[in-house]
Amino acid sequence: MKNKNNSKANFYPSALTIAGSDSSGGAGIQADLRTFNAFAVYGCSAITAITAQNPQKITAIQAIDSEVVGAEIDAVLAEIPIKFAKSGMLFNQEIVRVVAEKVKKYNLQLILDPVMVSTSGAVLLEQSAIEEIKKSLLPIAKVITPNIPEAELLLGQKITNEKELIQAAQKLAALYNTDVVLKGGHFANTPEAVDIVVLNQEAYRLKSPYLKNCRHSHGTGCTFSAALCALLALGTPLDDSILDAKTFVFGSLAEPVRVGNNCEVMYPPEMDYSEHVSLIGI
C-alpha cells in the first residue's frame, strides 16, 4: 500500500464510491472509504440509500432521492478531478439512470459491483433496477464484479460448478463488452477460493486459499471493488490491480478485528499476503 505523501502541496489521488450506507460499518460506503484510505487514496462518496443493519441482518432501508444522488456526484466532480469510481447498492431504477448519466457526463471509469441481495437475504435492488443496470450501466462499465447469485440474476441461469462459472464470466464479458471478475466465493468446502477473471476476452483463475470457518465475510464484495478502484486511481495496471485487490481482501479476512463479544469483522491487513494469491490463465 502507498504511503501518505508528506508534502501537502503535492497531488493526492482521489476516487468516488456511489453506494449505500451501512450503519454497522462493515460494508457499503463505510467499507469503501476505509479501503480507499488503506491505499492512501482520498475517498469521496455519493450515498444512494441509508440502511439500518449489522453483520447479521438489515432492518430498514431508505433510498435517497435520485436527484440528490446526482447532485452529490455533480458537487464532487465540480472541484475534484476524479477518473475512477465504483458503484455498489443503487437500489432503484431512478438512481441507476442518474448514475449512468453521470458516468457518461464525466467520462468516469466505473467499477460496477451489482449489489442485489444481502447475505441475510434482504433485497438491495428492485427488479426494475436490475433491467436498468443491464440496459444503462453494464455496457459502460470498465469492470464488473458480480458474485454467483448476482451473475445468475443477470444471465437468468444457474451456476453450479467451475465450468459454468467460466462460461458465465465469458458470457457477461461478451454481452456487455467489459472486463469481468466473477467471484466464486459462494462455492464452500473447497481448498481454494477461485474467481474467474475475463480481461480482453481472455479467461484467468484468480485464486487464494479458502479460509475455513470464516464468519466475518460481511463486506467482501464492497471491499474488493473499492480496492480495485483505489489501485486503478493510483495508476496500477488492471491485471495487477485485480491481483492486489484479491490479496487485500484475503488479508482483511485473515486479520479480522473484534468489535463485540461475538462479533469479528474484516479489517485492512498489516501483513503482506501476496504469496497466497495468484492470477493464472485458463
Image (cartoon, rainbow, N blue to C red):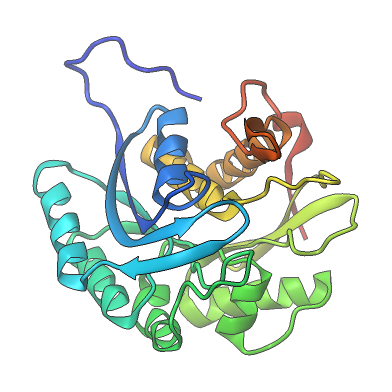
Q: Nearer the viewer, residue 273 or 202?
A: 273
179 on left or right of 272: left
Residue at image position (37%, 84%) is: 132
Q: Nearer the viewer, residue 177 or 15?
A: 15
Q: Nearer the viewer, residue 19 or 190?
A: 19
Task: Give the quadrant of the C terminus.
Answer: bottom right
17 on left or right of 200: left
Residue at image position (30%, 10%) is: 6
Residue extending farthest front: 261
Give above or below for 53 relative to 123.
Answer: above
Q: Where on the picture, by quarter, is residue 252?
A: top right
231 on left or right of 8: right
Residue at image position (71%, 29%) is: 273
Q: Nearer the viewer, residue 209 or 141?
A: 209
In percent of width and height, residue 161 lies at 84, 73
In percent of width and height, residue 134 lies at 43, 82
- Total number of numbered discs in the rendering: 0
Q: Where on the picture, by quarter, is residue 15?
A: top left
Give above or below for 238 relative to 177.
Answer: above
In percent of width and height, residue 97 lies at 27, 78
Q: Where on the picture, by quarter, is residue 250?
A: top right
The reply to whether residue 170 is visible in this rendering is no
Give above or below for 111 relative to 83.
Answer: below
The reply to whether residue 95 is visible in this rendering is yes
Residue extending farthest top: 6
